[in-house]
Image (spheres, rainbow, N blue to C red):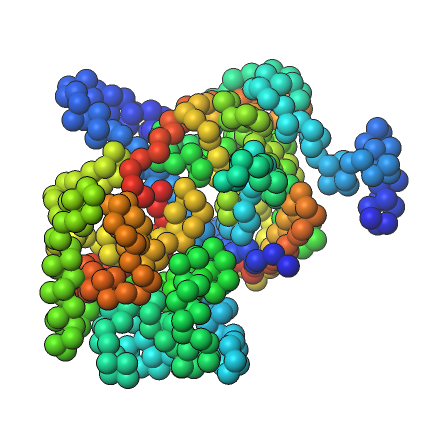
Amino acid sequence: MRSSEAIRLAILAGALSAAAAASAQGTTAEGIAKYREMLQDGNPADLFDMKGEELWKQKRGPKAATLERCDLGKGPGVLAGAFTELPRFFADTGKVMDLETRLIHCMVTIQGFNESDLYKAAPSIGRGEGANLVAMTTYLATQSRGMRFNLPQNRPEEKNMYEVGKRLFFQRAGPHDFSCSSCHGVEGGRIRLQDLPLLTKNPGDGVGFAAWPAYRVSNGQMWTMQKRLNDCYRQQRFPEPKFGSDVTIALGVYMGVNAKGAVSAVPTIKR
Amino acid sequence: MADPMRIRAALAGDETTVRVLMAHIMEPGTRRDAAGALIPAHFIQDVDASHNGKSVLKAMWTGAVSQNPFLSFKFKGAAKGDKVVVKWVDNKRDTRTDEATIA
Amino acid sequence: MKSTRRSALKATGAFATLVSLGLVTQSQAQAAVDRASFSVKTLDDALKAIGGTPANSDQVTVVSPDIAENGAVVPVGVTSKLPNTTEIYIIIEKNPTPLAAAFMIPAGTAADVQTRVKMGQSTNVVAVVKADGKLFSATKETKVTLGGCGG
């Protein structure tokens, strides 16, 4: 052990003996923060990013076309800043769409893939087109790394989705009478060692909405926001939402607008 | 052919730091599936890194190395623009070789 | 296989026979321990396989977190300030097969490696290095915990 680290730990030990339970939790939180910091260098999410870039630029589907002209909201092929402005309204579909549903839309219109096949495959994130969607979502989101969230709220559809998302966020239901707010509507919330970001406002850079897609070390999977929301509902013992459903888009708008100004750290690495 | 590795090699002073991320499931062979059957072992056994044809690191791994393994090491004697080559072989004799240019 | 056999005939000692019989690959012939060592079930057996009881040394450092959120991915680094460090071993004491990884360090390469390992439970991470033919070690305890909901 290096002497500077020994000194640091000695100081820490001294501080511990002064105040019991609260700082015991503090030390653990510090330990966890150190663990997460050690994982930052070399995020396996980069492997998904690489794969996604390859797929994006590859001629695929019945039309044997690349996705490089796909419009994610800032013009065909413009990737920087696209992720941090999603979900948003798209005139060509008349709907508010998030990154993942917009990606499927491009695969259908530009490459000729079958839309319902893609929606069916999407939840299976470990194989086939589901895995490809995850890789491309990771790649596309990574193109906005370091940029600030700035979802548009100009269209009535966008404002409407925000209000729907807000209502859903606070709606208690399911066998445990949970809502999103049960965990994410309180300041300083925690489940065992996981801090729960407060999502009714900007929780800070790189957390909450600004942290997904994320590589999860516990299962070696890349989780996108659609997967994260799906699993939140599952954990609340709700029926799980369909991939890309209005519920998921509305919640994305609510969280994304609340996170205005937060810096995207995507792709992150998590437990 | 297995998925590509991500290799970053950077020269600082006279030392090159190489950071590698390998795409591999690293299945230890001790886990069981939903039916209770053992999932067969599938992990990288040998890693070989070289520079200008000379080996700069060899490693022997087991299923105890994490999925999508990370490896970092440092060596001297290289210059910017040189190539570092990393090769892995797993227990099923599947293999992958990738290279990176030292920045 | 052919080129392996040809170069195997150039190797000397018992390994040469094993390689030519196809029982040991060429890379293993150059390695420090044989593949079978990685199946041993205790720290003591792992040390035996590596070559004996190492002497504790403050010139060897294990860099691992005090507490890991998830045992599936625990970053572990080993550095050795001892001259002529040629081998580095990472042992996770309470793992079912404690010997997790071995690194062979040629001249010109730093005795400073980092990787990530699986830890089944809170236990000691033991690093053993061979320097000038002698064995030295350092130990660091890392606690493993699961944590909350996966946020």
Residue C11 in sight from this viewpoint: no
Q: Nearer the viewer, residue A40 or A131?
A: A131
Measuring from the top left, give residue A5's x and y in whole percent.
Answer: 33, 29
Measuring from the top left, give residue C60's x and y in whole percent.
Answer: 50, 26
Q: Nearer the viewer, residue C143 or C54?
A: C143
Q: Give the answer, above or below, for where C92 lies relative to A242.
A: above
Residue C45 in sight from this viewpoint: yes
Q: Give the answer, above or below, for where B12 lies relative to C141.
A: below
Q: Is residue C72 left or right of residue A161?
A: right
Q: Residue at x 51, y 77 (%)?
A: A61
Check the image and name the residue furthest to the front.
Answer: A175
Q: Residue at x 35, y 33 (%)?
A: C146
Measuring from the top left, give residue A220's x and y in whole percent.
Answer: 45, 47
Q: Residue at x 51, y 48 (%)?
A: B68
Q: Nearer the viewer, residue A46 or A186?
A: A186
**Snapshot quadrant of residue A264:** bottom left
Measuring from the top left, give residue A48's x and y in whole percent.
Answer: 46, 58
Q: Give the answer, above or below, for where A139 lies relative to C4.
A: below
